[in-house]
């Protein structure tokens, strides 16, 4: 058994950071969450959580005061709660879809295909594409166009690894004309 806060899921990192104004460094790949035998959502109304925080039932007084001024604000907790509920619903849908495949009930499969183009600076786009693929029960592909002008190899490799962590099929092509390659691959 283990516990996990929603802000620690890789695909939700940018979304949570936008809401909380805090970038979480400790993240896990979504597949760990999705492959868990059982997931139990521990849900509490934001106002009750805030009351527990104020009463010192979560953190000591000094740490609680800081938390209440920063991360633990009612509007943020409401948004994070919604994200947690939606992500759990997506996991349930994924499990139902997998069960339909096992039972040869392919009527539910949408046949959707999400394509994301990889470069050195688009981790947010990769995460958003992964969320879309999950929501639409779609295949995720990541197109990487090798170009001699690209200098940021390390960041590019990190984004390729990020796409792989979402089970994206990685497609590599060579060309100077990036737009043509995107159009060619997607047709």
Image: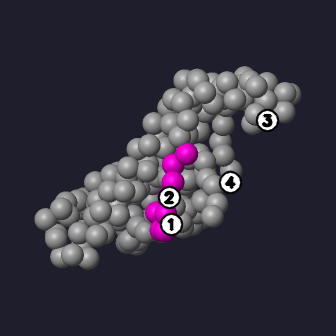
Identify the residue position indicated by label 1 in the image.
36
Give the mark count. 4
Q: Which mark is residue 59?
A: 3
Identify the residue position indicated by label 2 in the image.
39
Q: First in sequence: mark 4 or mark 3?
A: 4
Query: In this picture, is 36 found above or below 103?
Result: above
Query: What SS does tag 3 mark?
Result: loop
Position in image of residue 134 (x %, y %)? 36, 56
Query: What SS does tag 4 mark?
Result: loop
Disc 1, disc 2: CB below 8 Å?
Answer: yes
Identify the residue position indicated by label 4 in the image.
26
Position in image of residue 74 (x %, y %)? 58, 23
* Front: mark 4 or 2: 2
Q: First in sequence: mark 3 or mark 1?
A: 1
- Report whether 27 appears left or right of 145: right
Along the viewing direction, whichever of 47 and 18 lies nearer the viewer: 47
């Amino acid at each position: 058994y283990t516990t996990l806060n929603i802000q620690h899921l890789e695909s939700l990192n940018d979304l949570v950071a936008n809401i909380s104004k805090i970038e979480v460094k400790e993240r896990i790949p979504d597949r760990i969450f999705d492959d868990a035998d059982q997931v139990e959502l521990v849900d509490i109304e934001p106002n009750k959580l805030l009351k527990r925080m104020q009463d010192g039932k979560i953190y000591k007084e000094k740490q609680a005061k800081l938390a209440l001024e920063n991360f633990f604000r009612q509007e943020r907790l409401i948004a994070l709660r919604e994200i947690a509920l939606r992500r759990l619903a997506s996991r349930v849908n994924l499990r139902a879809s997998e069960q339909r495949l096992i039972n040869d009930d392919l009527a539910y499969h949408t046949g959707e295909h999400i394509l994301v183009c990889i470069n050195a600076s688009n981790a947010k786009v990769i995460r958003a594409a992964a969320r879309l693929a999950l929501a639409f029960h779609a295949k995720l592909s990541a197109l990487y166009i090798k170009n001699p002008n690209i200098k940021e190899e390390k960041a590019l490799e990190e984004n390729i690894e990020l796409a792989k962590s979402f089970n994206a099929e990685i497609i590599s092509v060579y060309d100077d004309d990036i737009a043509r390659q995107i159009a060619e691959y997607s047709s």
